[in-house]
Amino acid sequence: MDLLIQLTLNGLFNGAHFALLAMGFALIFGTTGVVHFAYGPVYAVGAYIVWALVALAGLPFWAAVILGVAATAAFGVASYLFIYRPFEIGGSPPFVVLVASLGLFIVLKNLIGIVFGTDVKTVDSVAYDVHFVGDAFFTTVQVGQVLAALLVGCGIALFLRASRYGKAIRAMADNREMATVIGIDTKRLSILVFALGSAVSAVAGSLVLLRDGLNPNMGFGAVFVAFVAVIVGGVGSLRGAVIAGFLLAFVQSLGMWQIPTEWQNTIVFVVLFGFLLARPSGIVRRA
Amino acid sequence: MSAIHTMPIAEPLLEVRGLSAGYGKRAVVHDVDLTVRAGEIRVLLGHNGAGKTTLVRSVFGLIRPSSGSVRYRGEEITKRRCADNVKAGIALVPQGHGIFRSLTVRENLELGAYTADDPAATKTNRDAVMDLFPILRERAGQIAGTMSGGQQQMLAMGMALMHRPDVMILDEPSIGLAPNLVQRVMEAIAEVNRALRMAVLMVEQNVVHALPIAQSVTVLRTGRKIYEGAPEPLGDRQYLMTLF
């Protein structure tokens, strides 16, 4: 019973992490149509920057997060402007952009290894508490993950619903050509969603730095989960991505009750295939 | 109808000269001249693949023409960005999905005025558009994609009207609509033209429904202009047959 409570808690907290990652990816993919696999390593770069600012430069954690988020946004925008945009202008098919994205993924991942080394990076200067529910436990960092997902999610939802740029983003995600026809600058909006999406991933990355520490491969799992969550949730739906993020985390976590941990990614795949077969348009269908 | 042709000739709004355009190396439109005058409805007729859509899309700036020029109110606008053309008073209602299906009718209309910077004027325009198409007021909160095809076409036109254009380019507004709806859409276009004194350049294949509201006609065949003039001669079936 205690194990089940612990696994449920893990599912909840990890769900918040997955939801954050999925929101960032959904913003970028849903709006621009770019399958931004380098989202993973860009998120990792952001987390490493936060680590370096805390562990090497001695900055307080909150200041490091602010700078790290800004730097990650800049990285995301650069990947759009220098890698994807030239293909877009040239009218390349999505497959070519996908290959470029994989190329960027490999380059960034290896650069992280070269610059920071392949050992696990942690910060020990930030203290946090452990709380118990019976024999099950959670930490303040995990509470922070839930709060971050909640705040970021509400913030983005409000932005998309109420602001001029938010509505333009929804319009572009819905019908890109029509967006151009009514005079929306799709390049400027692409820059905006790459900045926003990458910034969201950096929030997730900062908290993972405290929870698990960093390694150069962390980007793969992140973009994998984000991608599956966006497909399962329904492309173009932020709400769907969040729900799917939690769903994946719960299925993964509760699966560990009976299934060995090395099957975790397989479980995610099974959920993906299940949805592709039974409900290909995802949890939240678009009109 | 006949009164229109006795009126003095209005100033040209859109002037296309020697325009050629296509996709990649494949040229679709060859050396076409086309003029749209203030307040007129010009219908651009032609078969599937005659280059009508390519022509109007390059006029609007969605496609870069390979040669030729487009002038608007005497000003050179060839290869200008769509956003600038919208601001200058040109609107396009593209073929098929000219709306944002997952957004509400109200949001669609608001987005139609995306480039406008005067919120008060936008609100006035929205009311005017809703007066013109009362169904849009009735369905303001509805998700646009759940409306019928005819209503969606009204919304697409309403969006184009939101920034008070001087010329509206319509790309096959009758496509996918039942015949009685086509009739209603054509009436709406004629009404917009009359009420707002707005020039219309309309691409159509539906000769029967388009000709009655046309004031001048251009016919394309395989990317070249083969007829330009009044709509009346085309009413003669025999003559139309020789053209097509």
Image (cartoon, coloured by chain):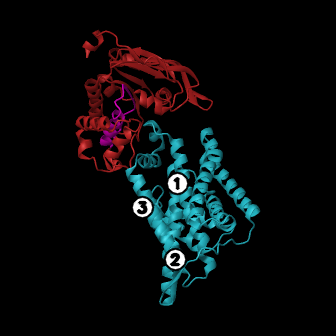
Chain colours: A cyan, B red
Q: Nearer the viewer, mark 2 or mark 3?
A: 2
Tell me if mark 2 has few (under 14), some (14-19) or many (20+) residues whose alpha carbon lies within 10 angstroms of its own: few
User: Callout 2, which amino acid?
Assistant: Thr
Q: Position of residue A1 (x, y in %)?
A: 48, 90
Looking at the rendering, the stretch of residues picked out in magenta corresponds to B149-173
Task: Name the residue rendered at 62%, 60% in the picture.
Answer: A46
Task: Name the residue rendered at 48%, 32% in the picture.
Answer: B82
Label 1 element class: helix
Residue B110 is inside the magenta segment: no
Q: List the residue tagged with mark 1.
A: A196
Vertical position of residue A55 compared to residue A101: above or below: below
Q: Position of residue B131 (x, y in %)?
A: 23, 36
C-alpha distance separating marks 1 and 2 = 26 Å
Q: List the residue tagged with mark 3.
A: A154
Label 3 element class: helix
- Horizontal placement of B124 versus A2: left or right? left
Task: Name the residue rendered at 68%, 69% in the picture.
Answer: A215
User: Callout 1, which amino acid?
Assistant: Leu
Q: Which mark is residue B113?
A: none
Q: Position of residue A69 (x, y in %)?
A: 57, 58
* Sequence-earlier tag: 2 or 3: 2
The foreground one among B226 and B20 is B20
Residue B76 appears in the figure: yes
Q: Nearer the viewer, mark 1 or mark 2?
A: 2
Q: List the residue tagged with mark 2.
A: A140
What is the quadrant of the C terminus of chain B in the image?
Answer: top left
Vertical position of residue B236 compared to residue A16: above or below: above
C-alpha distance separating marks 2 and 3 = 21 Å
Tell me if mark 1 has few (under 14), some (14-19) or many (20+) residues whose alpha carbon lies within 10 angstroms of its own: many
Task: Name the residue rendered at 76%, 62% in the picture.
Answer: A114
